[in-house]
Image (spheres, rainbow, N blue to C red):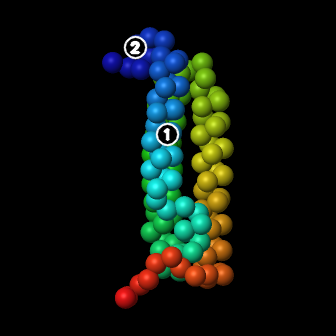
Amino acid sequence: MALNEIGNLGSRGIALIVAAGIVYEIIAANCSSPQTTELNASARAETLMKYVKLGEVQAAIFIGVAAAYDKENAVPIIAGGVMAGVMMHLLYVHAKNAGISNGGQPTENYGV
């Protein structure tokens, strides 16, 4: 069954994006952050950025599904997702570059 055959899913699209967003926010708050990326970039920049990219793909899927469910609000759903995605991507790129160029005290011990 195609999404457009299900009926008016406007509030369901909003509910989906809110539910997904809070799960990602909670998990992200307990995992790596741009600050941790900067501090550990010398050893983990490539891995950290791999997961940023995987997160962007997951976010794009959720934004796309939410926009398909809620066609009336598709533009603001997509705009909000794109804006947040670009801002977070740039934040992590900055953190990676700053960590590689400035070093700093890492939060992890390697080879111990």
Locate the C terminus by quadrant.
bottom left
Residue occupying the far top of the picture: 7
Residue nearer the viewer, 106 or 67 = 106
- Nearer to us of marks 2 and 1 is 1
Report the residue at 63% width, 73% height from top: 97
Q: Which residue is mark 2?
A: 6
Mark 1 residue crowding within 10 angstroms, few (<14) / some (14–19) / many (20+):
few
Seen as rendered, the residue at the extreme bottom is 112
The image shows residue 48 at horizontal and vertical percentages of 48, 66
| Residue 58 at least partly seen | yes
- Residue 54 placement (x, y as % from top left): 45, 54
**Residue ID for mark 1:** 22
Say what secondary structure mark 2 lies in.
Answer: loop
The amino acid pointed to by label 2 is: Ile
Label 1, secondary structure: give it.
helix
Q: Is residue 57 above or below residue 12?
A: below
- Tell me, yes or no, whether the two marked residues, 2 and 1, touch with CB atoms within 8 Å: no
Q: Which is more toward the observer, 6 or 41? A: 41
Residue 26 is situated, as x and y percent measured from the top left of the image, at: 47, 47
